Image: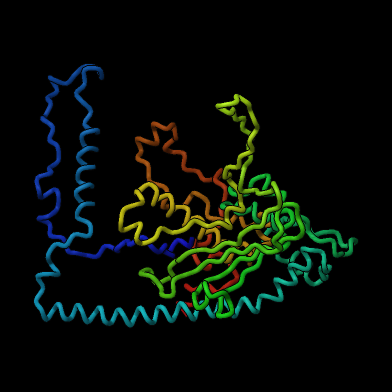
Amino acid sequence: MSSNVPISGQNVTAPTPQNTPLNQAPIALGLSRPTVPDISEDNEPDDAENAGPDLSGMEAHMLGMVHGKLAGLLGKSSGYIENLPVDVKLSVEALKGVQVKQNELQNQYKRECLELEKKYLTLQKPLYERRHAIISGAAEPTTEEIEAGEQYSTKDNEEYTPLPKDTKPSATGIPEFWLTALRNHVGLSELITDRDAEALKHLDDVRIAYLDDATSAETKGKPGFKIEFVFGPNDFFENEVLEKTYLYQEEVGYSGDFVYDRAIGTEIRWKEDKDLTKEFEIKKQRNKNTNRTRLVRKAKPTESFFNFFSPPVPPAEEELESGDIDDDELEEIEEKLEVDYQIGEDLKEKIIPRAVDYFTGKALEFEVMDDDEDDYEDLDDEDDDEDGFDEDSDSDADVPVRRRAPPKGRGAGGNNVNPEECKQQ
């Protein structure tokens, strides 16, 4: 899921500034720093074994208590708003009325950006068809296309060696193009098993379509998009096209972006004993009365790329309110929903528009790996010394140069219209 697109059904209320008075802070309530009696040099121990107790644990414990108290204050009213004069409260309510109109404009803006994305997808359609013709071998590449591609390669890599000119282009096609492209995406590569690869070798094309009034009654009038996986004849399933539809809610959320509602996947018509989402095992059973044995073949779920077409279902409001779902289970569902949505967004914004870059592996240079700066923290000098790093070793000669990764979320790395750019124009 896009990093700035929330998931519906969580009932998370954004914290608001309550101007909590200082006299409510935990420190003022008596949580003072631990004091340590002075130790004279005469009483100082001679060796480490006779040294006093390490206070780091105590300080960490007190710090945890302070953080716990602060977390408990989050979202609680300090009484400031409630004690405002009535005329000031009326002004606050008026600001809310202004905010309602801002929300309406934001909703209109997002709708228009979505229409702009549809317009440019229509302009791109002939290029996608041309790409499919070259990949499938239905048409041979032109000299102009090859020259433009080589200029693109030279601009990106000064050491690029042009291809020999004595070989004429032909309609040979590119085998396993989409399987290779999908495997070069960080998230999808973790989902594709060796068994899946045998089926994905028959993947002929991956397309995107936006929802409109011509769609089914279930999706009619709702904003969203659909990813289509077009397959050739294969030994695994009968479907020619597998679809995954992503729906947004009709109004934008608190973040100013569309709110993810749910996803709908195609029911795969598997051929006999070819279901890649299941694993079969043979078990021996014994009859309690006759003592005879028999072999039973049982199926159990297994990891597979094709589970992508059976998306996780967000919990219903009733389940959340009744507490039928515990915190661990809810967290697991939310993680699955986020991963599922992010893959859909990456297919729409990155893989489909820049398929050749994923096929060649160039896109990996721009992928956001697990090295976001937010995931790191500065280490103290003492920690550096303990880990054996030389404090004076600040040379970056051996550090590989990384391209600046594109921002996560909608519009990252695709040719479709970036709503954030649209906002600035």
- Nearer the observer, 282 or 358: 282
Question: Which quadrant would residue 139 be assigned to in this image?
Answer: bottom right
Question: Which quadrant would residue 254 be assigned to in this image?
Answer: bottom left
Horizontally, residue 337 falls left or right of residue 193, namely left
Judging from the image, the colouring scheme is rainbow
Question: Which quadrant would residue 252 be assigned to in this image?
Answer: bottom left
Return the residue found at the far right: 166
The image shows residue 282, relative to residue 45, as above or below, that is below
Return the residue found at the far front: 289
Q: Is residue 154 visible?
A: no
Residue 424 is situated, as x and y percent measured from the top left of the image, at 45, 77
- Nearer the observer, 381 or 223: 223
Residue 394 is situated, as x and y percent measured from the top left of the image, at 46, 42
Residue depicted at x 10% and y 50%: 28
Residue 80 is situated, as x and y percent measured from the top left of the image, at 13, 67
The image shows residue 152, relative to residue 274, as above or below, that is below
The image shows residue 234, relative to residue 414, as above or below, that is above
Residue depicted at x 38% and y 68%: 255
Q: Is residue 179 visible?
A: yes
Residue 154 is situated, as x and y percent measured from the top left of the image, at 72, 62
How many numbered marks, from 0 up?
Answer: 0
Residue depicted at x 52% and y 72%: 218
Horizontally, residue 387 falls left or right of residue 284, namely left
The image shows residue 363, relative to residue 118, as above or below, that is above
Horizontally, residue 209 falls left or right of residue 260, namely right
- Nearer the observer, 56 or 193: 193
